[in-house]
Image: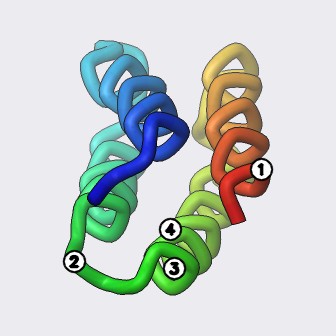
Amino acid sequence: MASEKIDEAVEILDELYNDKTIPKNIKALITNVKQELQSNKDKDIKIDSALLIIDSIANDTNLPVYARTQVWKAVSILESEE
């Protein structure tokens, strides 16, 4: 069962995904993160997997600065869930 914090992080990622200024490669990674978070795996495992992918998103030079802030907000939410 998904927690409220995971749902909140997914909502942030959805907003980024729907942003027309986000590059396609980052949107693909966002899709991967969402799939991890919505999987049936153990909560800690899916959060750790998602955080690994999110790290590559945050370090992508093509990510707009305002979007990077949103990514780190999602990271913070997920880390507080661990």
Mark 2 neighbour density, 10 Å: few (under 14) some (14–19) many (20 or more): few
Residue at horizontal 63%, vertical 38%? 74
Q: Which residue is mark 3?
A: 49
Q: Compared to 37, does 62 lie above or below?
A: above
Image mark for residue 40 = 2
> Image check: 75 left or right of 41?
right
Residue depth check, mark 3 versus mark 2: number of the one nearer the observer? 2
Residue contact between numbered discs 2 and 4, judged by CB atoms under 8 Å: no
Q: Compared to 49, does 5 lie above or below?
A: above
| Distance (Cα) linking label 1 and label 4 | 14 Å
The answer to whether one can see residue 29 in this image is yes
Residue at horizontal 62%, vertical 66%? 51
| Distance (Cα) linking label 4 and label 3 | 4 Å
Residue 23 lies, in percent from the top left, at: 38, 36
The answer to whether one can see residue 25 in this image is no
> Image check: 4 left or right of 2?
right
* Secondary element at tag 4: helix
The residue type indicated by label 3 comes to Ser
Residue at horizontal 30%, vertical 14%? 20
Q: Which residue is mark 1?
A: 80
Residue contact between numbered discs 1 and 4, judged by CB atoms under 8 Å: no
Q: Which residue is mark 4?
A: 50
- Nearer the N terminus, badge 2 or badge 4? 2
Residue 49 lies, in percent from the top left, at: 51, 79
The mark tally for this picture is: 4
Q: Quadrant of the C terminus?
A: bottom right
Residue depth check, mark 2 versus mark 4: number of the one nearer the observer? 2
Residue contact between numbered discs 4 and 3, judged by CB atoms under 8 Å: yes
Q: Nearer the viewer, residue 1 or 61?
A: 1
